[in-house]
Amino acid sequence: MAADVGSLARELGLEQYAVLGHSYGAFVVLQHAVNFPGDAAQTIVSSGIPSARFLEQIARNLAAFEPGELREQVTSSWEREKFVRTQGEVVQLLHDQWPFQFADPHDPRIEDYERHTAGAIYSTDVLRRFASGEYGGIEVEDRLGDVTQPVLVLAGRHDRTCSVEAAQAIAEGVR
């Protein structure tokens, strides 16, 4: 996927381009930055990690997540990602995961967010593949010094999945 970023830019005739990736997309643009330094004029990494070692923090965050019934709901939804087949199943998975993604698991804006994103189309094949393959096995922390373009790293202070510590590792690793 990282190679596809540059291929798409060339196919579109873009002499200069910036890339923005959020969540799993952050893994893709970060991999692109280390594999193809300087191809993008700028790279924006939003809620990403430079190494699978940062995924270990998710288990700790989940173990401390309250209330307990939502902890079980989130845990089981992640396991179900490996078997999802329909759009409705993805919508239910996301519904079950949103409390973990918000600072307040009972935030009334979760319902608003679901209303605004109703009708989104998800690739069940991609979700299944990456849930079964540890989400791509990102391991670029030791190569961040190879990146030559400016990189903006964004993180949410309440992000329980892609932590501020992971963002700091990216920011410190890029020259």
Image (spheres, rainbow, N blue to C red):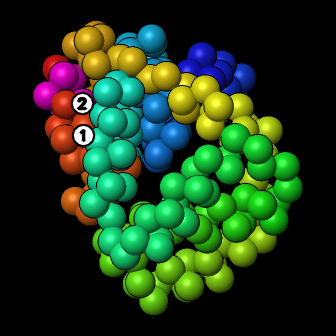
State the residue position of label 2. Answer: 170
Q: Which residues are magenta?
A: 170-174
User: Where 175 sits versus 165, above or below?
Assistant: above
Query: x and y percent of residue 44 in the render?
Result: 37, 40
Contact between labelled residues 2 and 1, with CB atoms less than 8 Å apart: yes
Left or right: residue 67 compared with residue 18:
left
Q: Residue at x 21, y 23 (%)?
A: 174
Say how many tags the image has: 2
User: Looking at the picture, which amino acid does disc 2 mark?
Assistant: Ile
User: Where 80 sits versus 72, above or below?
Assistant: above
Left or right: residue 22 compared with residue 129:
left
As measured in the structure, the alpha-carbon distance from the residue carrying label 1 to the one carrying label 2 is 5 Å
Viewer-side residue, 84 vs 149: 84
Query: x and y percent of residue 82 in the render?
Result: 70, 41
Q: Place residue 168 in its image quadrant.
A: top left
Viewer-side residue, 89 vs 143: 89
In the image, farthest residue toward the bottom: 108
In the image, farthest residue toward the right: 86
Q: Residues within 10 Å of mark 2 (few under 14, many from 20)?
A: many
User: Looking at the picture, which amino acid does disc 1 mark?
Assistant: Ala
State the residue position of label 1. Answer: 167
Q: Secondary structure at mark 2?
A: helix
